[in-house]
Amino acid sequence: MSSQSKTTYDIPVVDLAPFFNGAPGAAEKTAERLRWIQEEVGFYYITNHGVPSALIKAAHDQVKAFHSQPLKDKLAIKVDERSTGYVPFKSTVYVTSEVAENTRKDLNENIRIVRERPADHPGIRADRRFTGPNKWPASEKLADFKPVMLEYFQAMEDLGYAMLPLYALALGLPSDYLNDLFTDPCWITRNVHYPPSTAEENQFGIAPHTDHGFITLLPINEVPALEVQAMDRSWIPARYIENAIIVNSGDFMAKWTNGRFRATPHRVLPPSKDRYISALFYNPNWDVSSAPLPGCSRPDHPRPHQTTIMLDHLCAYVDSNYAQSAGGMQDDQSFS
């Protein structure tokens, strides 16, 4: 596997302070920059985002503590038919990738946690996938895991919601256009451990792929590994920026905008030392349609996909890329 990368451009940085502080014209100016980024790059850093750095560190510490458990303890909450829980090492091959022919199992393990909902939530009563209930570790040594992670996820959800006006304005829509589509967002998280590993040919921490959803929010990690594919197909390392969160759009965003906003390919190389991250895939409500948003369906750009809803889109993505033993539909023996 080659890890060589070119540096033909850098991933842009967006300072959210003027927008969050209500500076005159800041929403429009930030949205204009976001429009260019989403059409040309698809990845960017945000600074002054409002998520406390201490909370991000605490969440990463809890992810590390979870993955430091014996394997038998992690397997006690293995992912189930509701698609929550522990996903073991080498459980994914991203066959949906349009930028690479991925044939090797990815070198990571993660615990998938979704939005916490009450037991009487209609989606839980209906056994709807990616709705809950979550599976939490039982060890007394991880007593802080659930409260810390829930606080962190709430902060990240709040950030995603606060950014919706920017995306609406970037698409030429009223600033509150998207708000009602995110009242019970179908977000999921991957809380990942990438161990230092010797990769075989065409094997990665995560192979080249695009994300499934609306946007992904990922506090950048000091351990380098993430790379983003530029328009010229070169790979750009995501440099570390203290307290920054990296944001990218996924396949549902590309469908929603009829290809106007890019779902940018990226990959994770096997790191030189243990790497722990917590990514939140911020998505609209489960039943939101992928039909193009107003202004995104044009005679010169016909709709390129069949319309689906958020939950079905998410299920199809996971089922295609995850092994049967990890809650997907891949034949576990099909890949090495």
Image (cartoon, helix red, strand yellow):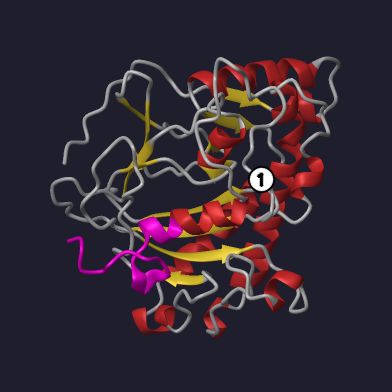
Whether residue 244 is visible here, answered yes or no, is no
Q: Which residues are magenta?
A: 318-336
Q: Residue at x 38, y 57 (%)?
A: 320
**6 lies above or below 264:** above
Whether residue 1 is visible here, answered yes or no, is yes
- At numbered mark 1, what does the secondary structure look like: helix, strand or loop? loop
Q: Is residue 238 left or right of residue 20?
A: left
Q: Residue 161's x, y, as percent?
A: 74, 43
Q: Residue at x 79, y 31 (%)?
A: 20
Residue in the foreground of this view, choosing between 148 and 108: 108
Question: If the image is split into quadrants, where does the N terminus sit?
Answer: top left
Q: Residue at x 62, y 50 (%)?
A: 309
Q: Residue at x 72, y 40 (%)?
A: 50
Q: Residue 218's x, y, as percent?
A: 53, 44
Q: Mark 1 Cα within 10 Å, few/some/many (few <14, many 20+)?
A: many
Residue in the foreground of this view, choosing between 311 and 161: 311
Q: Which residue is mark 1?
A: 289
**32 lies above or below 189:** above
Quarter holding residue 323: bottom left
Residue in the foreground of this view, choosing between 124 and 190: 124
13 inside magenta stretch: no
Question: If the image is split into quadrants, where does the C terminus sit?
Answer: bottom left
Residue in the foreground of this view, choosing between 86 and 56: 86
Quarter holding residue 118: bottom right
**276 lies above or below 12:** below
**101 lies above or below 17:** below
Kind of residue sitting beneath label 1: Ser
Q: Residue 260's x, y, as percent?
A: 56, 23
Numbered disc total: 1
325 inside magenta stretch: yes
Q: Residue 266's x, y, as percent?
A: 38, 37
Quarter holding residue 193: bottom left
